Image (cartoon, rainbow, N blue to C red):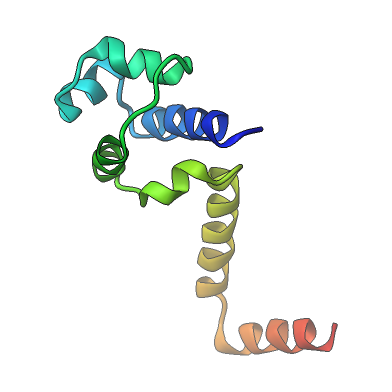
Amino acid sequence: MDLKHIFIKNLKKFRVENGLSQMKLAELCNTAPSYIGEIEIGRRFPSWKLIDKIGQILKIEPYRFFISNVCEKQDDLEEIINYLIKLSERERFYIINRLSAS
């Protein structure tokens, strides 16, 4: 998958996760709703300035639009971190020692 398609896939995913329609995202970006639609079907590509603006609105770093499967990997990492935080110090020590021995 090329960068343009990765961007489109991630833009849609992040937009939906934030509960925004194309129309609402366009409104927040001060652009036409049809422009966001054209971006999401691959007819147009936004400027770097607009990519930065969309990132601010969706509360993500703009580079994340260009990483394949970024959402799944980020969610997995956050789930692992949250699990480790809930463990006792002794349990974390055990896990770290087991991982170091591997």
Residue at the image position 52 percent from the left and 31 percent from the top: 4
Q: Nearer the viewer, residue 40 or 2?
A: 2
The image shows residue 72, relative to residue 83, as above or below, that is above
Q: Is residue 26 left or right of residue 76?
A: left
User: How many numbered marks, from 0 up?
Assistant: 0
- Most extreme residue toward the top is 34
- Most extreme residue toward the right is 102
Q: Is residue 1 left or right of residue 38?
A: right
Percent across and percent down for residue 57 are: 24, 39
Q: Nearer the viewer, residue 14 or 48?
A: 48
Q: Is residue 73 left or right of residue 31?
A: right
The image shows residue 23, relative to residue 77, as above or below, that is above
Residue at the image position 34 percent from the left and 34 percent from the top: 18
Q: Quadrant of the N terminus?
A: top right
Percent across and percent down for residue 24 are: 22, 21
Q: Specify the quadrant of the image occupied by residue 37.
A: top left
Residue at the image position 30 percent from the left and 25 percent from the top: 20
Residue at the image position 48 percent from the left and 18 percent from the top: 42
The image shows residue 74, relative to residue 10, as above or below, that is below
Q: Nearer the viewer, residue 60 or 67?
A: 67
Q: Specify the quadrant of the image occupied by residue 77.
A: bottom right
Q: Quadrant of the C terminus?
A: bottom right
The image shows residue 87, relative to residue 15, as above or below, that is below
Percent across and percent down for residue 91 are: 65, 83
Percent across and percent down for residue 83 are: 56, 66
